[in-house]
Image: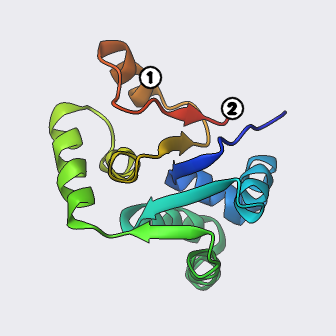
């Protein structure tokens, strides 16, 4: 499987952060794009939180906390905590039937003019795209 990460600014969903922590093929492709500075990544603290609890369920709290902390401190992620991100996420949630965390991925993308990137296709997002396109089209890595 070949995974293409766009050059420029990307907003990474929690699913991509989980791939990074897991060292999967998708995660390796994202890491290569970030390390070569072809891509600049943005995330929200909400995405960081979701990543930690999902990883926690797989490997336990201590390992999850350590992995997420290392990722957050790696220098590869710009963690956006701008109040506009929260307002934009609320507006998206008001209009769309997708998870609040996915709303944050799209909100970070909008505020930072980035491509929203998800590890795999999400049925809720696809359904919403059929109703009305998002301002920024998401990229699914699979």
In the orientation shown, which residue stands out farthest toward the right? 1
Numbered disc 1: secondary structure? helix
Residue 81 appears in which quarter of the rendering? bottom left
Residue 82 position, x and y percent, is 27, 67
Question: Which quadrant is the C terminus positioned in?
Answer: top right
According to the image, label 2 marks what residue? 142
Residue 3 position, x and y percent, is 76, 38
Q: How is the image coloured?
A: rainbow
Q: Is residue 16 visible in the rendered structure shown here?
A: yes
- Residue at 47%, 46% (x, y): give it: 114
- Residue at 48%, 42% (x, y): give it: 116
- CA distance for labels 1 and 2: 13 Å
- Residue at 46%, 26% (x, y): give it: 123
**Residue 85: numbered disc:** none
Numbered disc 2: secondary structure? loop
Q: Of 19 and 134, which appears nearest the observer?
A: 134
Left or right: 112, with 96 as reference point: right
Left or right: 4, with 60 as reference point: right
Q: Earlier in the sequence, mark 1 or mark 2?
A: 1
Residue 4 appears in which quarter of the rendering? top right
Q: Of 79 and 45, which appears nearest the observer?
A: 79
Q: Quick check: 73 above or below 42?
A: below
Q: Quick check: 133 above or below 139?
A: above
**Residue 126: numbered disc:** 1
Question: Which quadrant is the N terminus positioned in?
Answer: top right
Q: Quick check: 66 above or below 112?
A: below
Q: Is residue 52 visible in the rendered structure shown here?
A: no
């Amino acid at each position: 499987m070949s995974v293409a990460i766009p050059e420029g600014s990307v907003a990474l969903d929690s699913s991509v952060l989980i791939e990074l922590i897991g060292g999967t093929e998708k995660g390796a492709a994202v890491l290569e794009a970030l390390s070569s500075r072809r891509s600049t990544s943005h995330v929200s603290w909400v995405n960081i939180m979701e990543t930690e609890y999902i990883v926690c369920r797989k490997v336990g709290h201590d390992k999850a906390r350590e992995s997420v902390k290392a990722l957050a401190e790696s220098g590869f992620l710009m963690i956006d905590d701008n109040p506009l991100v929260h307002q934009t996420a609320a507006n998206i949630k008001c209009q769309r039937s997708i998870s609040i965390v996915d709303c944050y991925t799209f909100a970070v993308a909008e505020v930072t003019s980035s491509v929203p990137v998800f590890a795999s296709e999400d049925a809720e997002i696809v359904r919403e795209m059929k109703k009305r396109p998002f301002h920024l089209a998401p990229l699914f890595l699979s």
